[in-house]
Image (tube, coloured by chain):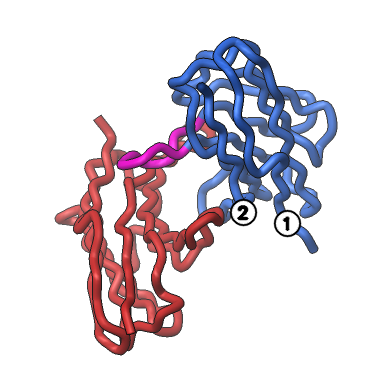
Amino acid sequence: NAGVTQTPKFRVLKTGQSMTLLCAQDMNHEYMYWYRQDPGMGLRLIHYSVGEGTTAKGEVPDGYNVSRLKKQNFLLGLESAAPSQTSVYFCASSYLASGANVLTFGAGSRLTVL
Amino acid sequence: KNQVEQSPQSLIILEGKNCTLQCNYTVSPFSNLRWYKQDTGRGPVSLTIMTFSENTKSNGRYTATLDADTKQSSLHITASQLSDSASYICVVRTSGGYNKLIFGAGTRLAVHP
């Protein structure tokens, strides 16, 4: 049981380039999330999805887009990368809304924008 | 503003010693509080969850406490091991809406032999 898998693990981009981070979960979870983690700060929610075909904005959605075409996959896109988007990105999933139900996180994707 | 503050930012202890990590929150309304452990280069993994009515909960060598009146939680680690070296993140959920989670910045713990 792989849990939550993120690809790629590392990526370096130049300002203005685009890229997509892929998140896949094999636990049949309804809810999926994308967070970013920056030094000295708590994880911040970028976008989330409450089910296949649905997405919603989180706390810091600007500069990112997402898609949930299949229940098991949640894609995070950067259309025109900026240095401020240098961060570690975590995907997570949960069976229900994240109340008592725990979030299962991926291992993270470290993105550097030059 | 909903906030979660953790202290200390970092901590170094010797193997076998005990330590306590603090979490203060100003989240309202409060639903629950969860402690996560994040190893270097990995995603956070849940250690324990505290609801409003719970004061103490243990998970092996980890004991979490919650004082809902003072809005404080602590995570006590007993007889530390090298494998306890990690960041410990306090996460508070507020009720209402989807995924209302407020994350603390974490305490980075280093256990030295």
Q: Which chain is blue?
A: A
Chain ID, mark 2: A
Looking at the rendering, which quadrant does residue A6 occupy? top right
Q: Secondary structure at mark 2?
A: strand
Disc on res. A3: 1
State the residue position of label 2.
A104
Name the residue: 17% across, 56% down.
B69
Sooner in the amino-acid sequence: mark 2 or mark 1: 1
Badge 2 amino acid:
Thr
Most foreground residue, A45 or B86: B86
Chain ID, mark 1: A
The C terminus of chain B is located in which quarter?
Answer: bottom left
Compared to residue B104, the image places residue B37 above or below, namely below
The N terminus of chain B is located in which quarter?
Answer: top left
- Give x and y (percent) for residue A85: 49, 24
Q: Colour of chain B?
A: red
Q: Secondary structure at mark 1?
A: loop
Most foreground residue, A62 or B41: B41
- The local crowd at label 2, few if under 14, some if 14 to 19, many if 20 or more residues have their Cα within 10 Å, is many
Is B29 a magenta residue?
no
Highlighted magenta segment, given as a residue range = A37-45
